[in-house]
Amino acid sequence: MRWRDLLFAHWPVDPDSVAGRLPRGVDVDTYRGDAYLGVVPFVMDDVRPRGSPVGLSFCELNLRTYVTVDGAPGVYFFNLDADDRLGVGIARSLFRLPYYRATMDVETRGTGADRVVSFRSRRTTGAKAAAFDARYGPDGGFDTPEPGSLGAFLTERYRFHTADDRGRLYHGDVAHEPWELAPAWADIGVNGLFRANGFDEPDGTPLLQFGGPIGVRAGRIRRS
């Protein structure tokens, strides 16, 4: 698959506010004492099994945090909203993962540093409504985060974790080249993901980064 038009919006939060929401065996990861909650809207293009000539394209929006499992760094997803009826249905019915069907619209204009993305999402399934509206784009040049930097801590992770509604833990692995990131601007008009997942709205201004297009390979989701 190929990911594009991706915004990383990250808020520093008290680690205790996150740790209490994680399943057994998953530990909150911190950077200089802070945990982070990230809201990530993006578009997935050409999603297909290896060898298939035909792929799908759809939008996704997730709320995530950063964790370790057995000492290894990863990402933990609280929700994954997607504009893909078939994929959402399979993920929820077979694995009971926190995928939710949403209607999403994305409009883009410009290229490179002049890229402007308008992203709108309205959840249509699930017990709690979640809406999101934002305009965003890069605000500077693209570069690979330095090892040990906050940018690398938040993005250079290649295993993700989530739990079903019975607390069973699952994981999956992804592979891609290092991120090319630019500082970003964003006008987030509506963001219902924190409330939908039982979090208070974080204080302060988020760290904003825009991800350049990137090719991604993903393995099967497995029981941990």
Image (cartoon, rainbow, N blue to C red):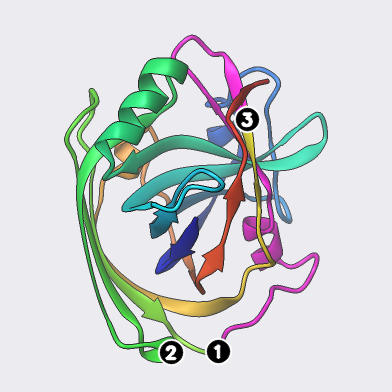
Q: Is residue 168 above or below residue 59?
A: above
CB under 8 Å between discs 2 and 1: yes
Q: Which residue is mark 3?
A: 171
Q: Residue at x 53, y 13 (%)?
A: 167
What's the CA distance linking mark 3 and mark 1? 33 Å
Q: Name the disc covering residue 113, or none.
A: 2
Q: Is residue 118 magenta?
A: no
Does residue 189 appear in the picture of this structure?
no
Amino acid type, label 1: Gly
- Asked whether 13 or 39 is in front, the reply is 39
Q: Decide: few, some or many residues near mark 1? Use Cα within 10 Å; few <14, some 14-19, many ≥20.
A: few
Choose top left, top right, bottom left or bottom right for residue 31: bottom right
Q: Which residues are magenta?
A: 142-170
On the question of residue 102 being in view, the answer is yes
Residue 185 tag number: none
Residue at mark 1: 141
Residue drawn at point x = 42 percent, y = 50 percent: 202
Residue 161, percent from left and from top: 60, 33
| Mark 2 crowd level (few <14, some 14–19, many ≥20, 10 Å Cα) | some
Q: CA distance from mark 2 to mark 1?
A: 7 Å
Q: Is residue 158 magenta?
A: yes
Nearer-N-terminus badge (3/2)? 2
At mark 3, the secondary structure is strand
Q: Quadrant of the C terminus?
A: top right
Which one is earlier in the sequence, the residue at label 3 or at label 1? 1
- At label 2, the amino acid type is Ala
